[in-house]
């Protein structure tokens, strides 16, 4: 005689309350009178999927830079974190400016550290107000 096997479908959240490991106890019960039982347990390690985007510690960074700042000046450092593991949580920084591509000419960013560095002199004579 077989018991009906109930299967519960759950979605594990590795970065949430579930944690990296899930442990379950299995119980075997005989049909004797009185019935006896034995138990064992098994543990499943939840491997990571890339379900978290990098999050910056701020929505917007603002920094003052002197007009005569020299090329190579460290302007500011951005920082993002990602809860996923290994490559899923490894962050590379890059710059983009969809609205004004010329702005990109002034700066470069170190892909791993997040430091933004002055690449071209800031020439106020090019700024028309
Ligand atoms: Ca994940
Ligand atoms: Ca991620």
Image: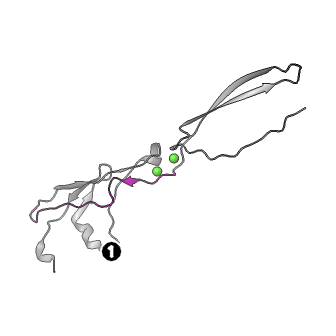
**Does residue 22 appear left or right of residue 78 in this picture?**
right
Residue 52 in magenta stretch: yes
Q: Ligand 2: does it lie within 8 Å of the C-beta at label 1?
A: no
- Which x, y percent locates residue 41? 67, 27
- 23 or 51, nearer to the observer: 23
- Which x, y percent locates residue 10? 65, 46
Q: Residue at x 50, y 44 (%)?
A: 15
- Which x, y percent locates residue 125? 11, 76
Classify 100 as above or below 114: below
Q: Quadrant of residue 58?
A: bottom left
Disc 1 crowd rating (10 Å Cα; few below 14, some 14-19, many 20+) is: few
* Range shown magenta: 51-70
Residue matched to label 1 = 99
- 58 or 31, nearer to the observer: 31
- 12 or 106, nearer to the observer: 12
- 127 or 9, nearer to the observer: 9
**Does residue 87 appear left or right of residue 11 in this picture?**
left
Classify 122 as above or below 117: below
Total number of numbered discs in the rendering: 1
Q: Residue at x 32, y 74 (%)?
A: 99
Which quarter of the image is occupied by the N terminus? top right
Among all residues in the image, which is located at the extreme right? Answer: 1
Asked which secondary structure carries label 1, the reply is loop
Residue 74 in magenta stretch: no
Q: Residue at x 15, y 76 (%)?
A: 126
Q: How is the image coloured?
A: one colour
Among all residues in the image, which is located at the extreme left? Answer: 68
Among all residues in the image, which is located at the extreme front? Answer: 34
Q: Quadrant of residue 96?
A: bottom left
- Which x, y percent locates residue 97? 32, 69
Which quarter of the image is occupied by the C terminus? bottom left
């Amino acid at each position: 005689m077989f018991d009906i096997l109930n299967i519960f479908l759950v979605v594990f959240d590795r970065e949430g309350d579930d944690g990296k490991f899930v442990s379950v106890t299995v119980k075997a019960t005989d049909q004797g009178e009185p019935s006896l039982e034995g138990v064992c347990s098994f543990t499943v390690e939840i491997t990571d999927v890339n379900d978290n985007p990098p999050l910056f510690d701020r929505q917007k960074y603002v920094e003052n830079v002197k007009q005569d700042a020299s090329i190579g000046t460290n302007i500011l450092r951005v920082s993002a974190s990602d809860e996923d593991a290994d490559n899923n949580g490894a962050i590379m920084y890059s710059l983009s400016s969809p609205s004004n591509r010329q702005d990109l000419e002034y700066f470069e960013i170190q892909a791993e550290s997040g430091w933004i560095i002055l690449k071209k002199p800031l020439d106020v004579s090019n700024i028309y107000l």
